[in-house]
Amino acid sequence: MRYLQTGYQAALVAAISGLTAASSFQNGSYDYIVVGGGPAGIITAERFTEAGKKVLLLERGVGPTVATGANETLPWNHDLTAVDLPGMSADIGNTDAWTNYICTDTEGTAACVLGGGVTLNYMVFVHPPDHDFDDNNNWPSGWKSNDLKPASERLYQRNPGTILPSADGKRYDQGLYNVLSNFFSNLGWKAVNMITQPNEKHQAYSYPSWNIKDQKRAGPVRTYLPLAQKSENFSLRLGTKVLRVVRDGSRVTGVEVQTSSGKTEIVTLAANGRVVLAAGALSTPRVLFNSGIGPKKQIETAQKSGISVPSENQWLELPVGVGLRDHPIFSIVVQTNGSFGVPDYDRILNGTDRKDIALYRQGSGLLTQGKHRMIFFTSNEVNGKTVYYQGSCAPDANSVLGITAYMTHGATSTGVLGIDSTQKTVIEQSPYLQTDADKQAASVFVKQMIRDITAPGTGLKLTTNLNESAIIDSMTPGIHYTSTAKMGTDSGLNGGSSVVDTNTKVYGMDNLYVVDGSIHPDLPTGNIQSTIMIVAEAAAARILGQDAHASHQGKGNATACPFA
């Protein structure tokens, strides 16, 4: 366990934040209550605020930065936490702050901290290819790649990602990249820029695109939240968990919350207000179950847990939790003849890595970069079906590299997310390699990787997992969960598979929306964070467009969708 330091400035900000958190809610005044301060929640809350609405953003976790109240800073810089420092992104889990950031009531790993998973992940920022939205007919009309280009542009204007974060224009610790670029080049693969060439996803490799801006971890906490906080119409409450939405039939009137002290209370909307759920693909379903929305079995379990579930005549039996998806990961560990190793995180954290810290103070060096040194993409076709793969490559030890190989877009397996009587969400059916098609595609991919790596003259050798079965058996969750409240035109109320419509409104409800990864009907080709943000941008525009339409009904005015 690595220990951070409490700085005076951070403690002062935390004290001020605590005073703010202790203030009373302004019941009956909120145009929007946004549930969950992850990437989707922050983006939609900021866009609603920008449109002049009164917005309350509720986050159950704490703030991870000095500006948001964190008091565990780097010993050598009291303006930064470990979360801020790109060079520490692979080691946050070994700091004493980690337990404050991870949810304890989800079976899969999820972040209960302001910023959500974007606060804690390895920062790989994959601009999605067009095919993520255009093939398989999973994303509905109005949500194809051309439809989402304006939303993408809005995101990238604020949060573009970078493949060259160091201010001096140099890349550091490139031994691994040199080894693998030579390997892939000899195989005939193409070197690409994964930001400017997002559609190159077959036999392509790139320097990593990271969610970094100005040499710090980026994401909505840094690129959206400060804009919202400038407005008097915006309020953020940390340490506030939403248990359920309060319903009057098809209309939501507010939310029931539980504060960090354990106290519960009802927060109410304005007369024409809306609730927007963005608690994440593993927690938004719990809020829906507790609100009488979902499969009967799950609502009954929520009822047994002591939650004030609506009366049965108000239940909406939608397929919440059904169709859970995730990227399975396969671990490929390779011994090379290259010269590279793992950073000394102890020395970085305690301040004795003076060379790298001195460079970072100038905005340059190893600490401006994330963990990975290369990202590659490829695909295979099995029985007429194309399945994509991403390889995130990082040092494992001296001259040893680890490939985190994700099976991504085109995978067909789905699972089921439910809830138990303690209010923990549980995976009732695994979403990994459940179909013969996925098993066959994974086998083809792994066999090809083994053949290429172990071919004579590569200078590479498999370690740890030495054959196909060992690599397949190494499978772990990608923690890129989606599809637990799927968007589509086939309403689950009529036997279909969808929970929300194409405006992200829950079927059967008048003013309840979902905007996080729960609604994604398919897996992306790469790490999911940029797709989460793009979809949130588009969802905010759709919801505001509905808001404007409702405001002008009966007035003879045609209102264009803002931000389109």
Image: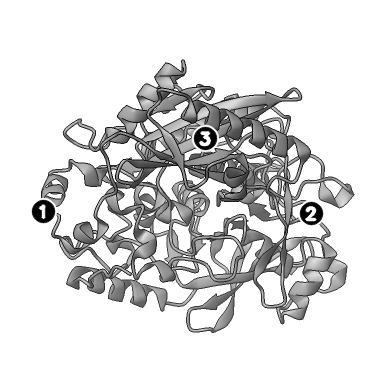
Three-letter code, disc 2: Pro
Q: Which class describes the residues within 10 Å of circle 2: few (<14), some (14-19), or many (20+)?
A: many
Amino acid type for the residue under numbered disc 3: Gln
* Left or right relative to 265: residue 342: left
Classify residue 444 by image quadrant.
top right
Residue 280 or residue 323, whichever sits in front:
323
The image shows residue 22, relative to residue 113, as above or below, that is: below
Residue 148: percent from the left, percent from the top? Answer: 56, 31
Marks 2 and 3 sit apart, C-alpha to C-alpha, by 30 Å
Residue wearing tag 3: 390
Sequence order check, earlier mark of 3 and 1: 1
Mark number displayed over residue 469: none
Q: Earlier in the sequence, mark 2 or mark 3?
A: 2
Marked residue nearer the N-terminal end (2 or 1) = 2
Q: Residue at x 31, y 61 (%)?
A: 65
Residue at 73% in and 63% down: 418
Closest to the observer, 330 or 339: 339
Q: Which residue is mark 2?
A: 319
Residue that carries the numbered disc 1 in the rendered image: 354
Residue 26 shows up from this direction: no
